[in-house]
Image: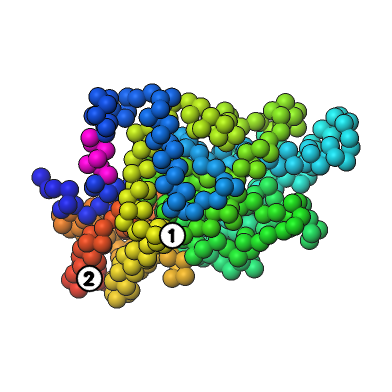
Amino acid sequence: MPGREAVAYFGAGPAPLPTPVLQKGAEAFVNFEETGLSLAEISHRSQTANKVLADTKTALTSLLQIPDSHDILFMHGGGSGEFSAVVFNMVAVWVEKRRKKAEDELGGDEPKILQRVKSELQHELRLDYLVTGSWSLKASQEAANLLEPLGKGFVNVALDSRESNAGKFGTIPPEDTWSLSSPGSKGGKGSAFVYYCDNETVDGVEFPGLPHCLNQSSQDPDDELLVVADMSSNFLSRRVDVSKYAVIFGGAQKNIGITDVTLVIVRKDILSCQPPPSFLHAVGVWSPPTIFSWPVIAKNNSLYNTMPIFSIWIAGEVMRGLLETHGQKGVAGQEELANQKAKILYDTLDTYPDVYQVVPHQSVRSRMNICFRIRQGDAAQEKAFLEYAESQLLQGLKGHRSVGGIRASNYNAVPMRNVQKLAAYMADFARKSKPASGH
């Protein structure tokens, strides 16, 4: 049987974890800090559990320089769960802003306030989505599904990148082609939020940074763009100005830790801007399910229900490892390393264009998920590539079932030596590869 160091794993998630974290985790799973108890056994209400949460928050705050304006939540449900949580919580914020404005203008006339907000909901509520891959598509579909009892037309797909790429994901069109909801200053009604997925794991598309049109500030609160970003698969791989975002969320199982933990970074003023549930219901909107209610989770220090303390501890160990490895550079140091690893793989693919075709456009190539085809999707050649790679202990390279092809996931815990091993294998395979007969 091969040892751990012999296997080069490039799975898209669950993803590799640093070996030292796993070794320390094995001890903690049996006897945490000589307490005689496993971290999987201790009470989530205990001092030990609270210290695990506090230490993990401290590490994450240090890595991303999270400002005091934002809170950190640990939740269940993964990124897909947050597709729903975003809609529930952010629509509630939108309703509360409208309720307060109506209250200021109408005084205490509650029937008129309710009627006005109900009318505004039907005619003005919009949720903007930038659809650049499979996960942002799922997020927009979930939003439409949740709001369908109110009617249709609430979800504005401001960008569907398939429309400019022959029906396939793989590009991000210029911002001036997007159809974001117009703000009040331009005669529109704005949107409750703008959602985008920073890195699409299935399609290998990554935004180079925060889109310029979303990096706008306004003195008028009605014109404020509340940006929501799903960073599940590139979290902690590059610098992020957290202050620019209303919400950032991500599942832990790619760059942060193991499954069953979802991290949410949310502005504190959003947590305090929630209407009474009775008003939401009267308007015709469901209040957030308690387990997905950001204010409830924040109020209870992420311990409203039983959280997986062991999983949170693993995430904290990963974060502390990054701080130890990169020192004062923090995430910037990991960004440099991620870029170097991605460059090695893309340079190798580009050296053999007759054999390898990278799926996304060069301007939006993901540093985390390198997606490519072999000889324009030759099934036999791709099968041979994967089978021989497995024999060389290069594992987890099969593309997502919905798109096929090859996918090498370059997450933080993938060491440079494994990237170099894969690059050497790709070069060797390309030199030996022959076109299929008849081509």
Q: Is residue 70 visible?
A: yes
Taking 275 as reference, is 227 above or below it?
below
Distance between the alpha carbons at the discs numbered 1 and 2:
28 Å
Is residue 133 rendered to the left or right of residue 245? left
> Residue 174: where, in percent of width, then height?
59, 69
Marks 1,2: beta carbons within 8 A: no
Disc 1 residue type? Answer: Arg
* Residue at left offset 49%, top offset 54%: 65
Is residue 431 rendered to the left or right of residue 166? left
Which disc number belongs to residue 238? Answer: 1
As for residue 111 lying within the magenta part, the answer is: no
For residue 8, what is the image quadrant? bottom left
Disc 1 on helix, strand or loop?
loop
Q: Is residue 375 visible?
A: no
* Residue at left offset 39%, top offset 30%: 49
* Residue at left offset 10%, top offset 45%: 1
Disc 2 on helix, strand or loop?
helix
Which color scheme is applied?
A: rainbow
Which residue is at the front of the view, 423 or 252? 252
Q: Please name the predominant secondary structure of the magenta segment in the image.
A: helix
Disc 2 residue type? Answer: Ala
Q: Which residue is mark 2?
A: 427
* Residue at left offset 56%, top offset 67%: 173
Part of the protein shown in magenta: 21-27
> Residue 168: where, in percent of width, then height?
48, 60
